[in-house]
Image (tube, coloured by chain):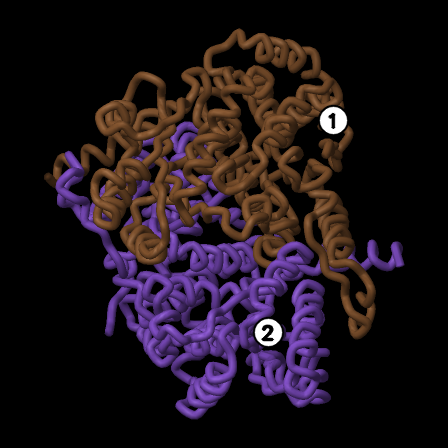
Chain colours: A purple, B brown
């Protein structure tokens, strides 16, 4: 195991020089974070403080679930599911969770209110052995609450109420909220979301670790990778990237296009979108984080990137040693004998050259491989980049006051109609 | 059958008034388009000019393929696959292509150079009965060419060269390009991409119609819907939306967030992203089109939308009668007895209220249902909106000169390394 993260910058000297000016402030913010001198910084070095006993408790619960089911339905929205989905897709290119033929399959629900989606999902899993897990700090958010009701009904119809109760799990606040109250009343098995960790920073707590372990991912390795992220070289790299992102904003860039050249990293990109968007998008500030899949989107948005309105910068995630490959056959003409991964690297180099030539600032975050170790390391790396960038921008990277607005309006609409 | 499209605007009066000023020019552009007085406007009313014989030819080829395979691998990138994927996912919420239990499953390849992706895909389909279809005007684009090599090898190993050749299909230019040359040499069955239709406007030509028909979609209904889009009321609505989008750009908005409240419409959103991005993103102009899934992304990007940098407008796609639903059970408290689709509508209304209150201009495009008919109608509607908007902006909505830049740089990198 091992692996590391390296960052490369393809952009004007002026942006990098201006970033230097933020270095001392970034050091200070990083120190404050590592001392956990701010609320909701429980995620900082959480991995280092996780005890063997706590890790064993998660693994033991996962083992119980693994013996019971062929499908594990994770019910959550935003930070309650994006991290687990990112891990399941990313680690070993999705095989981390499929190494054993009989590992339960993860499915996700409750991140929308589509009746079509949930009707189809229920139809698809109805004949499987099912366990479900509601992941929510409060239990009160509309989308997952309603999906939870639908899936509980499926379990009750299928197994009867008593056995259904033994197939329902919860990850929620230790004390408060309607989900904790239901856990107490019904006796579901549950794990705790630490009070000092916000949703989008919670993937390496039971929120993400339980689904990962159920899917057969080595969560010990994920945690080892997370610990390794506090090495001085990685901390320096994270602070530097935060300073550069802060500096890019001063160029007037209002969009950060983020993407990888491997489809298995798409959900990891989605996780970063929430992390950055919810942490930095406030007080009228921030760059709108936009996800792309590459090279796919060079054939859809590529025209815009090359010659359209230059309002954006790019962050590319490069997995140096992807977990699968194909060699082009002898009938491949110019491509004969080449590995697809090396052609993919040439596409990346070509894109960077082409976009740099028209002035797009480009950051490449290189990750050694798609191991559980590198996943844990990358999560902590981006969390630190995000928190430091937010503090450099003068916003609170740990709250999300604007998320409530549509919920309030939604409830107003429903009450009017009732 | 039937159905229609209605557009609603939630934005400042000033934007709508300014849009009025573009109405006469939009009329003129629409007239020019319908007279096909510009190059690459073969897509305009293509459906009306498609003969019964041409439609029958596509259906007949699809029937041959359907009898031969359980998996139909569509190899293409950008406009060569986005439309077919949009249709397969959208129509009847994905059931349009799954109505019969034994309809071949569509899989897509060649839209990236990920060795992991293609290795996994081949592993997954290896034991199926396979036909493949390479869709490309030239046949020279790197991503699909290389995937085509890999899948041809799979077929040859599995069936021998002669039978492999009978399982390979092509949709390409009538005369030119390396794929047409290979078709001639090897005798693959093929269909023609009309010379006067660009990739992103080609979904209702054989490019999209063949995969749809193989998947079991009623392409006659798709074409009927396309024809219905030229009704005066719909033409007026398309021109009006183009004028409003042009006007919104003058507000300094640089991003258009586009999304639906149904996951089955996600690929349709992706198709719009290419259509808008490649048509309008040139000469330093255009709004970057950004796809979202709702309400999912209100719990990731929602904070940014509510309180972040207000550089964007929103286009919401609302399917009035989605093809599936769930009723919340009696244990659902406040939600008990409500249909999930009505709760979803309340979320949409809540989002519009919340975002309008902070000044986001919001367009809602309402589509009656997810039928094949409404799909065909919606495709033509958005194509007309896009082309008229581009002409109002003073760009050519039918070229894509910038897409070549990264390909040239990629080939330079590969030659240097060889």
Tell me the quadrant of the picture where the N terminus of chain B can be found.
top right
Tell me the quadrant of the picture where the C terminus of chain B can be found.
top left
Residue at image x 28%, y 27%? B183
Numbered mark located on residue A135 in the image: 2
> Mark 2 belongs to which subunit?
A
Q: Residues within 10 Å of mark 1 (few under 14, many from 20)?
A: some
For the question of whether residue A284 can be seen, the reply is no
Judged from this view, the residue extending furthest toward the bottom is A53
Q: Which one is nearer the viewer's eye here, A80 or A382?
A: A80
Residue B163 sits above or below residue A179 on the image: above
Residue B28 sits above or below residue B165 on the image: above
Dot 1 falls on a residue whose secondary structure is helix
Residue at image x 21%, y 40%? B161
Relative horizontal placement of residue A83, taking residue B186 as reference (left or right): right
Q: Which one is nearer the viewer's eye here, A386 or B59?
A: B59
Numbered mark located on residue B16 in the image: 1
**Percent from the top left, x then y, of residue A168?**
61, 81
**Percent from the top left, x then y, of residue A318?**
30, 53
**Percent from the top left, x then y, of residue B211?**
46, 37
Based on the displayed image, in which of its 4 quarters is residue B20 positioned? top right
Relative horizontal placement of residue A50, taking residue A224 as reference (left or right): right
């Amino acid at each position: 195991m091992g692996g590391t993260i390296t960052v490369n910058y393809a952009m004007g000297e002026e942006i990098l020089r201006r970033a230097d000016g933020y270095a001392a402030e970034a050091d200070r913010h990083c120190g404050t974070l590592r001392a956990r001198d701010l609320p909701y910084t429980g995620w900082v070095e959480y991995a280092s403080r996780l005890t063997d006993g706590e890790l064993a408790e998660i693994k033991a619960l996962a083992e119980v679930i693994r013996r019971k089911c062929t499908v594990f339905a994770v019910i959550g929205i935003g930070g309650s599911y994006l991290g687990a989905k990112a891990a399941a897709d990313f680690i070993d290119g999705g095989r981390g969770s499929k190494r054993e033929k009989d590992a339960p399959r993860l499915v996700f629900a409750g991140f929308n209110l589509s009746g079509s989606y949930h009707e189809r999902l229920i139809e698809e899993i109805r004949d499987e052995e099912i366990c479900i897990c509601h992941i929510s700090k409060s239990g009160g958010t509309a989308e997952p609450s309603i999906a939870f009701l639908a899936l509980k009904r499926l379990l009750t119809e299928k197994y009867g109420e008593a056995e259904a109760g033994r197939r329902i799990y919860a990850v929620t606040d230790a004390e408060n909220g309607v989900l904790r109250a239901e856990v107490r009343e019904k006796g579901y098995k549950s794990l705790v979301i630490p009070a000092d960790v916000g949703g989008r920073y919670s993937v390496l707590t039971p929120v993400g670790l339980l689904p990962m372990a159920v899917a057969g991912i080595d969560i010990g390795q994920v945690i080892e990778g997370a610990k390794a992220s506090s090495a001085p070289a990685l901390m320096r790299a994270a602070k530097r990237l935060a300073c550069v992102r802060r500096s890019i904003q001063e160029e007037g860039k209002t969009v950060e296009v983020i993407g990888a050249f491997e489809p298995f990293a798409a959900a990891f990109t989605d996780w970063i979108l929430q992390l950055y968007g919810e942490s930095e998008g406030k007080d009228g500030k921030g760059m709108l984080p936009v996800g792309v899949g590459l090279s796919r989107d060079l054939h859809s948005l590529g025209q815009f990137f090359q010659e359209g309105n230059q309002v954006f910068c790019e962050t590319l995630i490069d997995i140096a040693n992807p977990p699968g490959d194909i060699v082009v056959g002898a009938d491949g003409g110019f491509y004969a004998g080449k590995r697809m991964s090396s052609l993919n690297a040439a596409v990346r180099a070509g894109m960077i050259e082409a976009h740099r030539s028209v002035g797009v600032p480009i950051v490449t975050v290189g990750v050694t491989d798609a191991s559980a170790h590198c996943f844990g390391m990358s999560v902590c790396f981006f969390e630190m980049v995000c928190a430091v960038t937010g503090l450099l921008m003068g916003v609170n990277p740990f709250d999300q006051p604007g998320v409530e607005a549509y919920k309030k309006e939604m409830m107003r609409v429903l009450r009017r109609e009732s």
